[in-house]
């Protein structure tokens, strides 16, 4: 493979020389001169052809993410280093947050950054190397999902007390499904189990587990789902540490029990699930109650209920018997004797109250009659007649005075009106001349032949103008 790559490199170099080199007369002896951009472009083509897909292992240094979302860092070992770029589009596929000092295995291609003439690796995927790196990725995802609230206790759904159909997402060939089926049959053979077979480790396992949870949620008869597998290394259990599985568990409307590995193993799925079981067998035990125990508990409750009802019945029977032994059950009329006595007492109190009330009103009426007689108008008639005569004289005097005063005022007003009345002037020989509806004060607007009216003290004259004489 190395020989083939070298052959391709030599071929590319030869091609670059034939196409991009320029013969220089001044260089002498057939020397070739490149432009910087031409040389950089040729080197870039050669490197991309030779290293178009490579795996490189090393330690991350100077990791930084810019505002655009792209990340830049250096990958190094104890002898060399190379610049790397992780574009935003590939960043979403990486399962952990890279940091300085992380030992990683990355996949990408070698290229040259034309602007600076530097070669670099364009990273397409990245995996942590070693157990410590996996544990770090686990802690980072756990913190992220915990901040989003995926692990909140108030979001946990309770498991049904007596489920009759259970969904299981696990490998169809693993020991986990056999353990679950054995425990379910032993505890309650009437409970049915629906298996969704899925890969539980390796590439694509997380997608299959998440798809299984989604598919089982489409059914109405599934009451609880068990998701899990048997024990293994951290790498073996890593599918249950994937973000996709955690989000599928949280989005499930059906309660989910996580049963991954052994009791000491903890995964992200355990924190996201509604209940964590230490093993698949324990998950079956926690999910399915023992049928015989349940029937025995029901029998005990039924017996306790019957005993309680019998005790209550006996209590009320004894109470009824004691009540029936009382005298009023044999002489029921005596029940009304106290009430009859009470009615008689109230009747007597009512009569006494009415009599007392009547006497009080009679006394009040007599007092008012006496006061009425004392205030009779007959006693004040002579005094009223004397006052009436005096008032009549005063009224006549006031009326006469007002009449005389108003008469004098009226005569004065008439004199003023006559003084200002234009008709009174006519009595002294004057007249008013008018043309149409307008009184004439001068000859302006009057022409010979016009008709004018002359008003006298008595009557009017309809005249025609023959001649107009102007005066001072």
Image (spheres, helix red, strand yellow):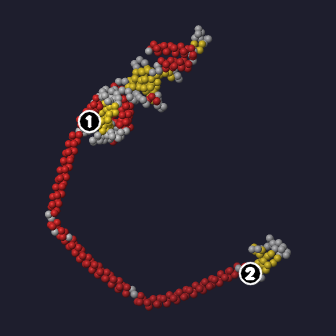
- Residue 327: where, in percent of width, then height? 15, 66
Q: CA distance from mark 2 to mark 1?
A: 138 Å
In the rendered view, tell whether residue 391 sits above or below residue 8: below
Residue 86 point in image, percent of width and height: 45, 27
Q: Quadrant of residue 92?
A: top left
Compare residues 427 and 269 and report the one nearer the observer: 269
Label 2: which residue?
425
State the residue at coordinates (58%, 11%).
31
Q: Position of residue 394 (x, y in %)?
A: 52, 87
Residue 439 placement, left or right of 23: right
Do the CB atoms of the residues marked 2 and 1 lie less than 8 Å apart? Answer: no
Q: Mark 1 — residue?
A: 184
Q: Left or right: 213 with respect to 114? A: left
User: 6 or 120: nearer the eye?
Assistant: 6
- Asked which secondary structure carries label 1, the reply is helix
> How dense is the environment of label 2, judged by Cα within 10 Å: few (below 14), some, or many (20 and up)?
some
Count numbered badges in the picture: 2
- Residue at 21%, 40% in the rendered image: 292
Q: Is residue 164 above or below residue 262?
A: below
Residue 289 place in picture, x, y as percent: 25, 39
The answer to which quarter of the image holds residue 36 is top right
Give the quadrant of the N terminus: top left
């Amino acid at each position: 493979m190395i020989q083939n790559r070298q052959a391709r490199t030599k071929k590319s170099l030869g091609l670059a020389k034939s196409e991009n080199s320029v013969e220089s007369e001044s260089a002498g002896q057939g020397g070739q001169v490149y432009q910087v951009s031409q040389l950089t472009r040729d080197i870039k083509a050669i490197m991309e052809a030779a290293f178009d897909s490579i795996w490189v292992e090393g330690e991350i240094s100077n990791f930084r993410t810019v505002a655009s979302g792209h990340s830049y860092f250096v990958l190094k070992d104890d002898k060399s280093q190379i610049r790397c770029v992780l574009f935003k589009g590939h960043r979403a596929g990486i399962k952990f947050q890279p940091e300085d000092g992380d030992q990683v295995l990355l996949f990408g291609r070698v290229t040259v950054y034309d602007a600076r003439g530097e070669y670099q690796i364009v990273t397409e995927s990245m995996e942590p190397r070693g157990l410590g790196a996996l544990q770090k990725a686990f802690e980072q995802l756990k913190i992220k999902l915990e901040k989003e609230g995926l692990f909140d206790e108030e979001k946990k759904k309770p498991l049904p007390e007596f489920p009759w159909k259970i969904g299981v997402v696990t490998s169809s060939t693993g020991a986990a499904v056999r353990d679950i089926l054995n425990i379910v049959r032993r505890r309650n053979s009437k409970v049915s189990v629906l298996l969704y077979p899925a890969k539980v480790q390796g590439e694509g396992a997380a997608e299959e587990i998440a798809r299984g949870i989604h598919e089982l949620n489409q059914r109405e008869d599934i009451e609880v789902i068990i998701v899990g597998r048997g024990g293994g290394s951290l790498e073996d259990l890593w599918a249950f540490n994937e973000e996709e599985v955690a989000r599928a568990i949280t989005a499930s409307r059906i309660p989910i029990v996580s049963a991954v590995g052994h009791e000491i193993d903890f995964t992200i799925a355990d924190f996201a699930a509604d209940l964590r079981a230490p093993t698949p067998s324990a998950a079956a035990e926690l999910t399915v109650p023992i049928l015989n125990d349940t029937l025995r508990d029901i029998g005990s409750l039924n017996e306790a209920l019957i005993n309680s009802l019998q005790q209550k019945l006996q209590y009320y029977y004894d109470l009824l018997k004691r009540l029936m032994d009382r005298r009023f059950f044999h002489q029921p009329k005596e029940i009304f004797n106290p009430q009859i006595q009470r009615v008689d007492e109230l009747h007597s109190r009512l009569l006494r109250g009415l009599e007392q009330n009547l006497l009080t009103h009679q006394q009040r009426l007599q007092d008012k009659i006496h006061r009425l007689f004392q205030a009779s108008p007959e006693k004040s008639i002579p005094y009223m007649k004397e006052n009436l005569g005096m008032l009549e004289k005063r009224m006549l005097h006031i009326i006469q005075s007002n009449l005389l005063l108003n008469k004098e005022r009226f005569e004065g007003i008439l004199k003023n009106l006559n003084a200002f009345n234009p008709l009174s002037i006519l009595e002294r020989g004057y007249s008013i001349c008018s043309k149409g509806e307008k009184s004439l004060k001068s000859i302006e607007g009057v022409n010979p032949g016009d008709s004018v009216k002359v008003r006298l003290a008595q009557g009017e004259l309809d005249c025609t103008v023959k001649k107009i004489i102007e005066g001072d």
